[in-house]
Amino acid sequence: MTFDLLLKGGHLIDPKNGIDAQKDLAITKGKVAAVDDDIPAGQAGKVIDVTGLTIIPGIVDIHAHMYATPGNRKAWAGDQSILPDGFSFRTGVTTMVDTGTAGWRTFEDFRYRVLERFQTRMFAFLNIVGLGMISTEIEQNFHDMDVDAFEAVARENGDLIVGSKTAHYLGPEWTPVDRTLEAARRIDKPAMIDFGLFPSNRPYYELVTQRMAAGDISTHMFLGDVPWLDADGRIFKYLYDARERGIIFDVGHGGGSFCFRLAVPAIEQGFYPDSISSDLHTHCMNAEMMDMPTVMSKLLVLGMPLPDVIRASTINPAQEIGHPELGHLSVGAVADVAALNLWKGDFTYLDVHGGSLKADRRLFNELTLFDGEVVWDWNGRTGVDYRELDPLYGVRNKKEGLILPPA
C-alpha cells in the first residue's frame, strides 16, 4: 500500500494552501502524504468515506484554561479550569493554548500536572503574575509581577511557552500591561492582553494604538466594554489603525466576552477576527460558548465566509503563537485533521448577556485525527459492519477460544 489512511470524498478547506474544493487526503506515518482530486482507494490500507463533510486542519484554540489543580475552588487555577482531552478532540481541536492560568511561580507544577500528561497538543502563555490566576486579588499584586523571574522561567520552558499574559487587572495603572509587554519583548514572543474594565485613565484605544506592538494579541475583542461604534454605527477608526499596526484581534468568547451588539456590526462592516478562540473554562463550557465549533458557527452566521472562519481557527492562530508548522494540510505537515458537518436547520445562538440570534446553519465536528490517528469518530465512519467481521470477534482468550457451558 502507498498510504496508511485515506480520507475520501470530502470538501477540503485549507486556507494556507488556497484550497476550497473536493479533495482526497492521504496520510502516512502521521503526516499528510498527498492531497489530490481523486486518490484511488486501493492505494491506502484504510479508507474513510467523508462524503458530505468539510475537511479542515485540526483546530488551534489559543485561549483556554487548563490548570485544573487541587487549588482554590473559585480560581481559574483550580476548579474553574478544565482538563484538555475531555474537550479537545470531540470538537475538532487538536492544539490548545493555556492563557496565563499559571505564572512563573507555578508553571513547573502546571507543566508536570497537565502539559506533559495529556494527549492534546498544548502550549501556554505565561502570566506576568508569579502565582498566575489563583485569585483575582492575586492578579492585582504588583510585587508578584517580576519580569526577570518571568524571563528565566520562560527561557527554561521555551518548548511550551508561547508568550506573556496579563488578565483581570482592575486598577487605574498601566503597570501590569507595561511589564507584560516588556516580558514579551525579552523572550521575543507576543503578549496577550486581557484588559479588564478599561477605566478612563487607561482607555482601550491607547492600549492598541500606542502601547501594544505588532504581533501582540488583544483578546476578548467583542467584550461589551470595548468601544466599537460611533454615533452613526460605524466602526471607530482607531480599530483600523490598530490593525494596520499589526495588533492581533482575538475572539476569546468565554463566559463574559462575546456581545452580539458589537460582533454583528463588526462582521457586517468586514472587521473579522484574526483568530477565533473559546476562552474555555468551567463557567462557559455548558453555557453560551459551549465549544469551538459553536463559536465558529456564530461568526459564520453573522456573515464571515467559511474559509475565513477556518483560517481564523487554524493557520492564523498557529502563526500567532509562533508554530506555523500547525494549522494546515501541506504535504509533509502533521496530520491533524477535523471533519465538520455543516448542518442546515433552525438554530438559535446566545451571547454572554442573554442576547439571542436565530440562524439556519451550525458547524458540528464528526471526526478528528491527531498525528494521523483517529481520536474522535462521532458517526462511526471508521467502523465495519459487525456482520462482516469474524464470528467470534471480541474474544480475548485467543489460545482457548470461547469457553462454552456443558451441553
Image: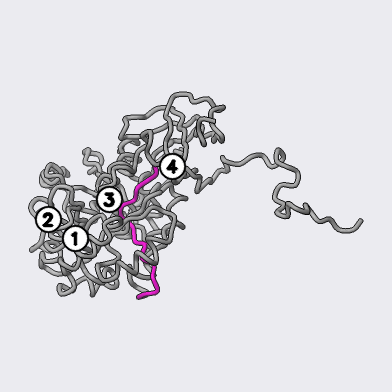
Residue 88 visible at all: yes
- The numbered mark at residue 338 is 4
Residue 327 position, x and y percent, is 34, 42
The quarter of the picture where residue 84 lies is bottom left
Dot 2 or dot 3, earlier in sequence = 2
Residue corresponding to mark 1: 195
In the picture, measured across the screen, residue 177 lies left or right of residue 377, that is left
Mark 4 and mark 2: Cα distance apart in space = 36 Å
In the picture, measured across the screen, residue 110 lies left or right of residue 188, that is right
User: Residue at (86%, 58%) from the top-left corner?
Assistant: 405
Closer to us: 123 or 366: 123
Segment tinted magenta in the rendering: 58-72
In the picture, measured across the screen, residue 43 lies left or right of residue 307, that is right
Q: Secondary structure at mark 2?
A: helix
Residue corresponding to mark 2: 207
Residue type beneath disc 1: Phe
* Dot 4 crowding, Cα within 10 Å, few <14, some 14–19, many 20+: many
Mark 4 and mark 3: Cα distance apart in space = 20 Å
Residue 317 position, x and y percent, is 28, 46
Closer to us: 373 or 285: 373
- Is the C-beta separation of discs 4 and 3 under 8 Å? no
User: Residue at (46%, 58%) from the top-left corner?
Assistant: 86
- The numbered mark at residue 251 is 3
Mark 3 and mark 1: Cα distance apart in space = 13 Å
User: Residue at (36%, 75%) from the top-left corner?
Assistant: 71
Dot 4 or dot 2, earlier in sequence = 2
